[in-house]
Every structure is written in C-alpha cells, then in structure tokens.
Image (cartoon, rainbow, N blue to C red):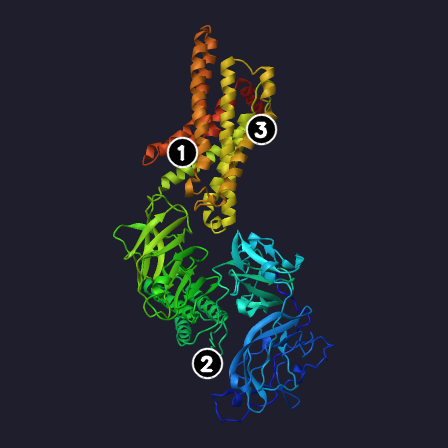
Amino acid sequence: MTNIDLPYCSVQQVSHSSSQANTRTNLSDPCYNYTVLDNPWRSINYTDVLHLHYKCDTSFTWSGWYRLFINGTSAHIPQTCIAQWYCGTATTLWIPDGHPTVKDGVVTRDVCGHWYNYCCFFRSFPIRVKACPGNYYVYELVSPAVYCSGYCADTGSINTSSTVTISTVNLSVDPCYNYTVLDNPWRANISQQSNSYMCDRSVTWSGWYRLFIRGQNAKVPDTCVAQYSCGTATTLWIPDGHPTVEDGVVTRDVCGHWNNYCCYYGSFPIRVKACPGNYYVYELVKPTYCDLAYCAVVTNISSTDTTVTPETTSAGINITLPVECNSQNCFQNLIEQIENISASQVLSTVTNILTIAFNASEKILESSSSSVSPAELASQGNSMLKTSEKLISTLVKPTDTSDNVSFTLAAVEGQVFMVGPQVTLDKIPRLDTTNSSVDIDLIGIAKNNNETTAVAFMSYNKMENLLKPDFFNTSNDTIKTMMSTVISATLPKTTNTKLTKPVNFTLKHIREFDPNGSLSCVYWNISEWIVDGCSVLETNSSNTVCSCVHLSTFALIMQTSRPPENDSLLDLLNLVCVIVGLVFFSLALLTFALCQWSPGVNNVARINICISLLLAHLLFLLTQQFLRLIRPQQVSCVAISGVLHFLFLSGFVWMFIEAVLLFICVKNLSQISSKKREVLSSGFLCVIGYTVALLVVGVSVGLLPEGYGSEQCWIKRDRGFIWSFLGPVCVILALNMILFINITINLNSTLKNLNAEVSQMKQTKIMVFKTLAQFVVLGCSWILGFFTNGSKVLEILFLILNSQQGTFIFLVYCVLNNEIRQQYRKFFRCLCCGLKKH
C-alpha cells in the first residue's frame, strides 16, 4: 500500500504576521502565554485556491501554545467537518470531539483531516486545547501527520461553559442474538507480510457481526495493531475502547495504522454493543480506502468491566530529540526526559515514546558499532530496560475487576494485565507475544494486595544487540547463541510483589536448534546473564519452557562446542576435487550428446545422473563461496536449499534406475529385450527419475516449510527434518548395495561358463573393472559419510570418491568403450589436421 498523494500541495512556510501576546499575568498558564496565529487563509470561508498553491502546516516548526485570529476577530479550530480544499490547504484539519469548558482545564483532542469525501479520512496527531476566560481558546499545535494539511480557523461563537450531550440509540431487534459470524483466520492479530493484502471495501457489509478466530471468541482490538498484520496492510482498530452491557449500543471511531502512526487513517465509525455472555457485536461498514481491514484479537473479554476513560492532565509530555541523535549524551538526555514522566499515559503516547527511544538506541549502536565496549553495551541495555519498564508502568490504571492493554512495535511487544479487588477470574489468561508467552499466578499475588495488581510482559526483538549472549560467563569455552528474544516481566505499581508460585515462560526458538547444544534459562543481572533461580522445565526443537522463582529480564541461551578450525588444505582439496568432477561431468555429457552410440545402448540414466549431480555440485559450490552474500537473504537461502534437496535426490533416484538397468543387463548378458525396452522407455524413466524427487520435496515443504534455509543454506536439523533427505538416500543406498552384490555374483557365475579365450578374458577383465567401478557410479561410496566422524582419512576418501562420480562415468562409459574411443581418435585426427593446415 502506498501513501495517498495530494498532488496540489506545495510547501510554504507558515508565517506569523503578528507579535506574541504581551500579557505576563501567569507565564505557566497558556491562556496568557501564547503566540498569535492570524493567517487569513486559515478561514473556513477561504476559497481562493484556483492557483492550486496550497499551504502545508507540516513545513512549520511548531512550539508552544497558539491563539487563532482571522482579520482581527478571535477564532477557533472548527469542531465540524470542513470541505476539502478550503482553509488554503488540501486536507482540512478539525477536531471532532469538540472544545472543553473553562473548568475542564487542559484536554487532549484528536484531529481529523477531510479527504476522499470522508470527514475523518486522515487522523492527525492529537493536540492539547484549553478554554480561557473571555470566550477564547488556545491550542498546543504540532506538525500534522498528513502531508499538505492545515489547521482551519472558524470565527463562529462557542459557549465555553457548556458541554455536548450524546444521545443513546434504541434498537427494535437486539443484535446480541441476531448477528452474522465473521471468522476469517487471516483477521488474527499476527504479523504476516505478503505480496497481496485483504481489503474490507470489497465486502458487502450488512447488519451486525460477531468475531471468532479458529473457534475462539474475539473482538476488534482497542489498542494499536502493527502494520501488515491481520492479513492486510493498514490495520483497523477502535481507539475509544469497548462499552459495557449497561452502555447499550455506542458509536466508535475507527483508526487505521500507517506510516508509524496508529491513527494515520480514520475510517467510517461503527456501532458496537457489549452482550451478556462476555462478547461484542459490531455493525461493520465499508472502510474508507484499500488496503484497510478490521482486525480481530482473541483475548479474555469481560463486557461487565468499566470502560477506560482518557484522563486529562495539565502536565503534558513533550519529548524532544535531534534528528541526528547518535551520541551517548543525546541518548542520556532522552532517557532523563522519559524518567521525568510520572502520570498515567494513554497507549498511543507510550508507543510513540518507545519508538523514539529504540530508534535513538539503534542509531547510536550503528554509528559506533566498532568502538562500543561490552560495559557500554550493558549500560545502554540497562537504560533501555529501565525506560521500557517505566513507560509500560504508566499504562497501569485502577480497576475493580480486570483490564488489559497490549501493543506491537518493530522493536518491542508488550502486554499489561490488571486485576482489581473484585476480580472474578480464577486465573488470568496466558500473556502472549509473537515469540514468547508467560504463565503467572497474578490472582494469587492480587490476594496479598488491597489494590490494583498488574503484570507487565515485554518481548524485545533487538535487545540481543545490547545484551549479548557472550555476557553469559561460563567456565567452559563454548559458543553462546541467543535462542529466544529477550523478555521482561515485572509487577508495576504493585505493593507486595512476592510470587505465590514459580513463573513459567515459553520461549520460541528464533534460531536453528542444535540437538547437541546445552540450553540455559538465564536472567539479566546488571552486567551479565546468570542462571540463579531459573531452570529448563521442558524443551523440544522449536520451544523451551523456563521456570523461574523471580521476575526480571530473561532469555534462552544455547551453548555449543566450538567446531574444529577449518583445515585450509582440506578446503583446497574439496575445491579442486569438485571442480575436477564438474569438468568430467561436462565431458561425459558432451560425449553422450555428440558421439554415435549403438541402438541398443540406453544412456538415459547416466545422462540424467550427470545433469542432476553437475547442477547440484555447481550450485552447492557457488553457494558456499558466496555464503556471506546469500545468507542475509533468507528467501534466497530457503530457495537454494529446496533446489539442492531436489537435485541431489533426483541424482540418487537416477543412480537407483542405473543399478536396475545394469542388473537386467548382467542378468541377461545381452541388451534389454524389446519388450523390456518398451516398459523402460526413456520417457517413462524420466517421469520416475524426477517425479519421485519432486514428490519428496513437495511433501517436505507441505509438512515443514520452515525446515529449509539453515546457516549453510541447506536443510535444517530441527525436528528431524534432515531425514527428508537422509531417509530416501538410505533406502536407495541399501537397494543399490543389494543390487550391486547381486550383479557381482551373477557376473562371476556367468564368466565361469564362458570359454577361456584371450579375447574373451580381456573383455571379461574390462567387465569386471566396469562392475567394480559401478560401486562409485551407483553412489554406494556415499555410505562412507556415516563413518567419517573424527576420521580425517575417511573424510578425504569420502570427498574424493563422491566428487569424482562424473570422472568414473566418463572412464567407464566413454574411455573404455571401443566405439567411442574410435570416435575420439577420429575427432583428434581431424583437429590435428586442421591445425596443421593453419
């Protein structure tokens, strides 16, 4: 999805033509400390836009509070929709929730932008508003989220002492019992980037809907959802929360997350009702644009809980950060600003500040990656942990029963679950993030507290760049690998934090699991990872469950033995042998293709062995030589491993076909009969040779698609997936060994009955040599691979024999064939004669 282009927008810096107010009665009160904003073009009646030269408030650096005037008359930002292309701009900005009264003090208001024939198509960043004595308003304006938009000004009157009353709606038919089930699995709040996205504008919406995900009760999220989740590009959610049963039917605005702003797009409002039985129904409508779609989140729904009411405060947050914040001093200044936050905050504020903090941390790490000491990394990691825990604690709000908040950002995911004194739950649901989950007895902890008790759970996607696995100090010299995301669990704003039972964390493995590795559940202790109080409860190839008797910052680290140092001579031998093998594969293919063969000779299996193994060895060689370039491109690595799987398997299938054909040839000591030749035609053999390999790879992809793309761009060992290759190979090698033994026995028995003439003996010796050479051609030498562990001699022998299958094919079927040798001599004579003439 791309941003909407507003083509008529040209940037002009906003100018203030009047001086600042001189009133100094109370500098802390914005009613007496503001800047006058009196641009005539901001008027809602300004329509002189024929020159298509729009003003854009995104070009101005806003600072502090402003009061609006139009031609000397006091004005205010309109609280009703303004037509497009008015106010001297393209997208007209207004505030849908109206103005406060004097007694309300400073409040926060959302800002809507009119576009595409919908009054709130865009949602800009919220602003703060205050009603002042004397019937005027002041605004703490910020740069809009939408390019080429402008704040409008209206000179109409508003009574600053009155409030707006919203009427309720009565329905003749209760939608709680008259709804349509909406159970598309793709609506689940799961990140799933794709080349195509769902769009709810293509759905014909009618009536009320209830959400389910795989049979579980679900609801439209009331917290920001990450972009590219829920099967779409722009995720839709409701920012004002859900109603209670007593509230009846309410209308809720709908936000769409885009361009790193949770409410960048505003979609048409929907109606919501909380129903007895703890579920919600929604009167959904077509969104304003594509690709927008309604998300669904499975969670513990309590429709009797009170709704969350945004709190107003006179102490707002204004985090400032230079564009090039890549120094420790700048970062520490940011951390100090965050430390000064004390009041409860709304989710959008917390996520915005977290994004700022993690972006600053990444910039610093990138700019000084080569010169940062371990102590500095640990210090920065501690700061980020402290900052994150401080910010997420501001989401905790008092509740009588239970409540929860969740968010997903690029760098961190988080969930907060709160229970109050009147909670009716026996157990809180498992708190889940993409790569981890936690089970904690929060109800038991709450019984030891007389107020709201909360648990905050966070999963950091990039924290291992700071808190490296090498900070896990052990006595043995091993390689430490971070097998999970770094997670953090705390009990914010809770007086008695004593655990009633151990906490269990389920950590998904984010890297390939080594069955020979040793896993440790560790927690962060200022400057190092330690294991005190944590243990591995259970593990498999994809997940590990850790049990800990305390809360902290945790991770899963795997220790593996250091591999032996690369043998440069062995690497050189490998390179030379593979290149030589490729040369002889090529020579054999040229011979099969260009030379004339007897009509009865069937070379189809040998040709396809050469083609499969030539491509497989060539691709494998190039992959290993350019592994550093290919490995970061995971899709390419997965594709290469799948192609290698197919090529090597097809090579082994053709080896088995060659063994069968050779067995038939030796059994009869003649060419295959016409009947058998019809059954074993080239077309039939090609179908068998490639279909079997393709079928095995297809089934493997279907069963475990993530099994491809190891660190070497080969098949992973996780969950025994390597047997998708080793299994068929072992079966073929076993059959080929049986056939080879039978061939040898039958040949020996037949030769004893032949006349002992010299010419016959000579042909017999050649036949015996060819038969023995078939041990390599049929791939039987691959059996050595099961016995090379720790033996350098067997490793070298395995390398030479299996890289030279093309060499043996060329010798046995080309060089030792009299007819082909005659054609070689003829070719070289012609070549020499041609050279002499020149």
**C-alpha gap between disc 1 and disc 2:** 72 Å
Q: What residue is pinned by disc 2?
A: 315
Nearer to me, 497 or 483: 497
Determine crowd level at label 2: few under 14, some 14-19, many 20+ residues with C-alpha closer than 10 A: few
Q: Nearer the viewer, mark 1 or mark 2?
A: 2
Nearer to me, 444 or 2: 444
Q: What residue is pinned by disc 3?
A: 686
| Above/below status of 434 relative to 746 | below
**C-alpha gap between disc 3 and disc 1:** 28 Å
Mark 1 vs 2, N-terminal side: 2
Amino acid type, mark 1: Leu
Residue 716, horizontal then vertical, whole percent: 44, 43
Q: What residue is pinned by disc 1?
A: 799
**C-alpha gap between disc 2 and disc 3:** 77 Å
Nearer to me, 464 or 165: 165
Amino acid type, mark 2: Ala
| Above/below status of 612 relative to 201 | above
Residue at disc 2, secondary structure: loop
Residue 680, horizontal then vertical, whole percent: 58, 22
Mark 2 vs 3, N-terminal side: 2
